[in-house]
Amino acid sequence: MLAVLAPGQGAQKPGMLTPWLELPGAESFFRWAGAIADADLLTLGTTGDAEAIRDTAVTQPLVVAMSLFVARELGGLPGPVAHTPHTGREVVIAGHSVGELTAAALAGVLSVEAAIALTAVRGRAMARACGLTPTGMSAVLGADPDELSAALERHGLTAANLNGGGQVVVAGPLEGLAALKAEPPAKARVVPLSVSGAFHTSYMGPAREELEGLVGGLRPADPSRLLLSNADGAAVSTGAEVLTRLVSQVTSPVRFDACLTTLRELGVTAAIELPPAGALAGLAKREWKGQDTNGGDVEVLALAGPGDLDRARGLIDAARGRPEAEHQPDWRVVVSPVRGTVSPADVPEGTRLPAGTPLGCVRSRREEVNVSAAYDGVLAEWLVHDGDLVDAGDPLARLYPEVPA
């Protein structure tokens, strides 16, 4: 089975588009993508310096557009071509942070245009949130988990990305990050990242609220490729759930370690990281070392330039025709559709719930929205109490999916 990995912000490099412009249609694609994103992506990706492409408002659409263009060049991946849930399911897709919008497009949930436009809105909203408080992020390598947790609490920081391969990205106020670097946990290395704020933390609350206000205008399709979520590494089966998770991930930790675990459990034998490639490929190599089905290393290809396209096409061709991999999450989460006060239904834990069973309502300032089970399953656990205040996307209850006999 083949995994396709879509990188997020922080993977960008000055001049990263330049080698790809030799491909037919590349320049016009990035001009078109820039028009959608309201940013000069072509100039930024060729002559923009490190500071220019560090700007969250433009970096996010630049990274997503680059990944989508190269995916289109590969030809064997879904994207701006017709595909159905019954073809080509030999590919499983996982994105990191904003790379989840790339992944959503490759899985057929969003059009390429919608993915780029939503990314641009996300980037601008997060840039505004970054401007409210000076914050940042640092990668921590080789730390003992307990020691790192104590250090984060001491310095007012949050574990924002659990990336696997021994890497945790922490976020918070700049003074806290500086203190952590000056006094890291034993045997740990702290590396400041080229980002402009504390992504995937509560500091991004205003950006999340902005996204909540517009995603209702989208009409997502259900994934036609196996698509994993950063929230928990589980496969996502509906387009509506993908959108909910894309909004909530702005303020929630990225669990790419869980995605790597799921990919290993699926029996992935090869992986391709789309450009700007390198970071996710490195994580995957460390996490999967000696863990393919034959006890060897999973082949991981970071697409660094056009010269790597033939090898990537070879990996795609090798995966074609294999049986579809199935991955059912151990549980599913029912989430709040709006911000407001929750009133759970009087349904005891352990109750079997057919799809559509009412689970209560959430009262916002403007409306009362009913919540129901989207799947057949068993109510495993209530995660809220009557009268709790919840945000859109917050978990309300945990369901175990019903497994056919």
Image (cartoon, rainbow, N blue to C red):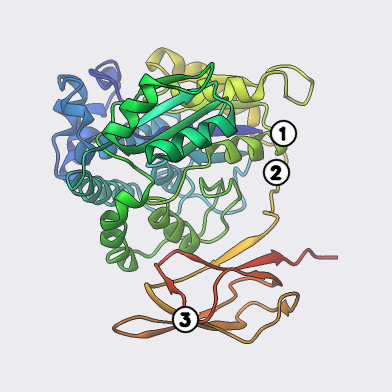
Residue 187 at x, y percent in the picture: 54, 16
Question: Mark 3 and 2 residues: CB-CB less than 8 Å, in contact?
Answer: no
Foreground mark, 3 or 1, reads 3
* 42 or 174, nearer to the observer: 174
Quadrant containing the C terminus in the rendered view: bottom right
Taking 101 as reference, is 20 left or right? Answer: left
Q: Of label 3 and label 2, which has the lower sequence position?
A: 2
What is the spatial separation of the Cα atoms under label 3 and label 2, in whole angstroms?
A: 42 Å
Taking 66 as reference, is 285 left or right? Answer: right
Q: Of label 3 and label 1, which has the lower sequence position?
A: 1
Residue 63 against residue 394 in the figure, above or below: above
Secondary structure state at the residue bearing disc 1: loop
Q: Quadrant of residue 262?
A: top right
What is the spatial separation of the Cα atoms under label 1 and label 2, in whole angstroms?
A: 8 Å
Residue 392 at x, y percent in the picture: 40, 67
Could you say which disc has been placed on residue 28 in the image? none
Q: Amino acid at mark 1?
A: Gly
Q: Amino acid at mark 3?
A: Gly
Residue that badge 1 annotates:
267
Foreground mark, 3 or 2, reads 3
Secondary structure state at the residue bearing disc 2: loop
What is the spatial separation of the Cα atoms under label 3 and label 1, in whole angstroms?
A: 44 Å
Residue that badge 3 annotates:
387
Residue 179 at x, y percent in the picture: 34, 27
Quadrant containing the N terminus in the rendered view: top right
* 143 or 400, nearer to the observer: 143
Q: Of label 1 and label 2, which has the lower sequence position?
A: 1
Residue 41 against residue 231 in the figure, above or below: above
Question: Mark 1 and 2 residues: CB-CB less than 8 Å, in contact?
Answer: yes
Taking 215 as reference, is 168 left or right? Answer: right
Q: Quadrant of residue 378?
A: bottom right
Residue that badge 2 annotates:
325
